[in-house]
Image: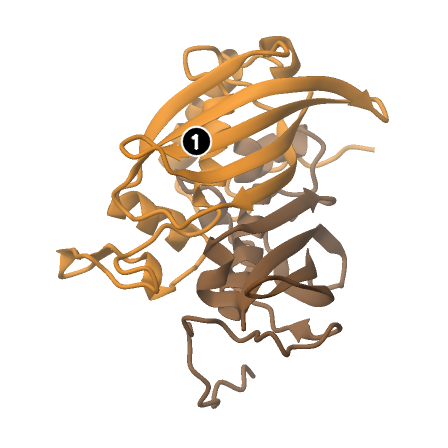
Amino acid sequence: MSGATTTRPVHPELGLITVDTPVGHELEGVQKVATIQLMGSRVWGRFNPNHWDPEYAANAGLAAPIQTGEMSSAYLAEMCVNHFGKYFFINSRIACKYISATLAGEVISTHGVITEKTPTERGVRFTVDIWAQNQDGEKKTAGEVEVDVDR
Amino acid sequence: MTTTPVRTDALKPMTPIQAEQTRAFVNGLAESSTPYWDMVEVGDELSRDLHLSPELVIMYADGVEEYNPWYEGWAMNIWHKDGTSPFGGAIVPPMLVSHFVLSVQFDHTKPFAVGSIHTFHDSRIHAPIPVGATVRISAVAIDKYVKRDRRYVRHEVTVTDVENGTTYLTETRDIMSL
């Protein structure tokens, strides 16, 4: 169950993180299924059959078609916008390393933990470890985000 | 031991004509493919302009099931609209232009490099991009290296507004090549 009975604002302009949010705070992620039809859509993986054609992927030694890494980055960015709102669009940093391929049909969830807070003139610069993993807990993408939040 | 070949329709239903069309498309890509490693020299710079139309933004967002209304400069029934975001009108999802860097790195005038894999990016988001902007995506090949018997090409990327020069995104990214 999603437990979607909360009354908190959706897409809050300033996000859910404030300057008082502590190190160790865990971001609530998003979940997606690596759906073959979306993986092979024209603006995503259509240009490379490894992203959507099971026959081609098998010949390349893959267990199944693999998502483009940028889809994981987009999932992680969605989580960051949920938590940092407009701040994520100004002077932020997001680094992602695609450490394992996401296979068609896997359920991907995103995660984040605040690891550092650095005071700035206007507030705090947060550093957050981020990652995406499948339903078995296997990490697919790992990286880091830095975002300025005003006080 | 024999293995059963994987069928084109293994993961989604297809009629024979759909499978034939799929194989024709895939075979066409393979015929014009060149290893990326061989296509790029350090110092190569490629640049293209991309109009971030409302429809393009919607297609990108739908592909990752991202339904934040901040990105909607187009809606069914209404079609074009200004949209709303914390910055006024509709804006572009934060990683959209990073995704389209791929189209610049792979020189569209040369054979396509099937088999390359994007492995890493380190992106700085400087400012929000309004839907409707035209951006110039420039990518410079800064390194080619081998690590654990795998070949990588590294690029530095800049994304700027064609009209007012605003820098929206800078990025370092790696492509692993066959």
* Visible residue check, residue B137: yes
Q: Nearer the viewer, residue A27 or B130?
A: B130
Q: Residue furthest right?
A: B148
Q: Is residue B118 left or right of residue A61?
A: left
Total marks drawn?
Answer: 1
Residue at 38 percent of width and 54 percent of height? B62
Is residue A101 among what the camera can see? Answer: no
Q: Amino acid at mark 1?
A: Thr
The residue that appears at 25% across and 43% down in the rendered structure is: B132
Q: Residue furthest left?
A: B78
Estimate the x, y position of residue B27 in percent, counting from the top left.
49, 20
Q: Colour of chain B?
A: orange
Task: Judge from the rendering whether residue B38 lies leftward or rightward of residue B112; answer left or right.
Answer: right
Residue visible at 69% across and 20% down in the picture:
B178
Asked which quadrant contains residue B42, the reply is top right
Q: Quadrant location of the N terminus of chain A?
A: bottom right
Subunit of mark 1?
B
Q: Which residue matches tag 1?
A: B22
